[in-house]
Image (cartoon, rainbow, N blue to C red):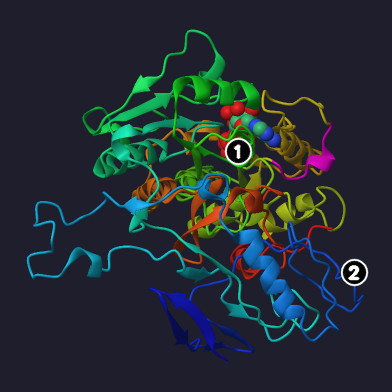
Amino acid sequence: MAVSLKSSGSFCSTPPQWLHSTRDRILYGYSHSNAKECTCKKTKRPAPLCVKATSTKVELDFNDPSWKQKFQEDWDKRFNLPRITDIYDLKPRPTTFSLKKNRSPAGDENGTPMDKWNGYVNSDDRALLKVIKYSSPNSAGAECIDPDCSWVEQWVHRAGPRKEIYYEPEEVKAAIVTCGGLCPGLNDVIRQIVFTLETYGVKNIVGIPFGYRGFFEKGLKEMPLSRHLVENINLAGGSFLGVSRGGAKTSEIVDSIQARRIDMLFVLGGNGTHAGANAIHEECRKRKLKVSVVAVPKTIDNDILLMDKTFGFDTAVEEAQRAINSAYIEARSAYHGIGLVKLMGRSSGFIAMHASLSSGQVDVCLIPEVPFTLDGEYGVLRHLEHLLKTKGFCVVCVAEAAGQELLQKSGATDASGNVILSDIGVHMQQKIKMHFKDIGVPADVKYIDPTYMVRACRANASDAILCTVLGQNAVHGAFAGFSGITSCICNTHYVYLPITEVITAPKRVNPNSRMWHRCLTSTGQPDFH
Ligand SMILES: Nc1ncnc2c1ncn2[C@@H]1O[C@H](COP(=O)(O)OP(=O)(O)O)[C@@H](O)[C@H]1O
Ligand SMILES: O=P(O)(O)OC[C@H]1O[C@](O)(COP(=O)(O)O)[C@@H](O)[C@@H]1O
Ligand SMILES: [Mg+2]
């Protein structure tokens, strides 16, 4: 099989270099586990897991020999990036972004003319979103499109600086806003956006205080930003600009964007923020405003579709495993000690799963994607009895959204409309204590809920790098004239995705993925139902 990739104005043919992994073949990298359990309605043939085509408009008939071509045409349409030239007839101009500063404008010190410099990304460059070729739908974690799980190329747009830009930097007013909950790395992204804007030559950069609220709340003034001002903000956690939930009224926000004469808006946030950014982008289009809205995916929950990870997630996992280490030490040192740790994650168990894996000290990991029972022969409590009997202590890690069906729902929502979860940690603490009292076995339960400690901290090294690249690419995307896009990492490559493709649902742990199976191998826990 050969793949064609149009690049640098010419077509290059690159045969995939397959590495064998038992039955499947892997094209470097690793797979995404954002598949959802679904049945392929059309054929009714067994397909244990098929990728839910989030916004596919075409119904595919897999008996049609050209289905693959149709899929790919539809894919290209869906992943095409919206740009301001869709509504405006604009001429591009040569970029002002160059790393080869202080050199003769005609060329570098070796005499290479700037137009031959390979530092720019060609608009036809693409990255592959998926890299595993599953030989069967029954392969672990298989994400299939058709019942035979055929290999289908899914290309997405490569991020980075373009040779031509659609804004005059001297005339640009750029704004940055950070929304939702806190997340390590917000300051790193703000800082890089400012640095990169200045490198292009932008002089008018402002921060919108306290999330979307800063657009319409009277008394909240925009904050002028410069390299000098943000130089060291990455040394602290939190957001230099402040954050908030709720209160997003798209038309008022766009009124404010219009009144402030903002040309570029950089929006840092999670699922809700991205939905808001897309609504702002659509409204700007409706009003025929020349505004680029570019998002950068932030959330410790790592619950945004299609991307490898969101910034802040790695740091949150690192902090979370410190809590697990403490729970382990407490449990190990107590007679019949049970360490219980509850970790954040609004609708997905990524932090709990990864912190359990990284700590290596967890005996039971409970996530919302995998139902469990506490009582009964196969319940968690019976397993804890077994662990106390066999090893004398144990550690349980529970995601905050896990086991919600076991609890009474409050029905309450936060200012953004997110459901306020019932407290599974406290519930489990009480249940465990009661259970061991009832059966007359001593148990010393130590409960740790690190809550905001996992996110109110400075980004670790890997997040700091991710933030740096995503922030820079966000600016390159805006100058390239894109709007309604997000700057992210897919399959280890930095890309732009249309926001519409990442907001259709929260990303969740796939219980059939190798990662969850690895977690189970590490904890050694049985099924709890
Ligand atoms: N569907 C939506 N459309 C427009 N704005 C939204 C939507 N959902 C949330 N928002 C706004 O986005 C901001 C952040 O959303 P929230 O869910 O709190 O955090 P996050 O973006 O981190 O998931 C809030 O100001 C909220 O009002
Ligand atoms: O108390 P808050 O600020 O509403 O935040 C609680 C929620 O925020 C998070 O930390 C992250 O959520 P967002 O990405 O939506 O901001 C969740 O893990 C948690 O459920
Ligand atoms: Mg969210």
Front one among 174 and 143: 174
Residue 33 in picture, x, y percent from top left: 64, 64
Please identify the residue farthest to the right as the structure is shown: 44
Assess mark 1: CB under 8 A from ligand 1?
no
Residue at horizontal 72%, vertical 72%? 71
Question: Over which residues does the magenta segment extend?
Answer: 401-408
On the image, the x and y values in percent for residue 103 come to: 9, 56
Residue 153 in picture, x, y percent from top left: 61, 77
The amino acid on which the numbered mark 2 sits, given as a three-letter code, is: Lys
Asked if the stretch drawn in magenta spans residue 376, the answer is no
Q: Earlier in the sequence, mark 2 or mark 1?
A: 2
Furthest residue in direction bottom, as rendered: 1
Give residue 435's quadrant in the image: top right
| Residue 41 disc label | 2
Read off the residue under disc 1: 285
Expressed as whole percent of the image width and height from the top left, the position of residue 303 reads 62, 49
- Nearest the eye: 386 or 170: 170
Q: Which secondary structure lies at badge 1?
A: helix
- Mark 1: few, some, or many residues within 10 Å (few <14, many ≥20)? some
Who's the residue at 84% across and 58% down the image? 529
Q: Magenta stretch mostly in which secondary structure?
A: loop
Q: Nearer the viewer, mark 2 or mark 1?
A: 1
Seen as rendered, the residue at the extreme top is 219
Categorize mark 2 by other alpha carbons within 10 Å: few (<14), some (14-19), many (20+): few
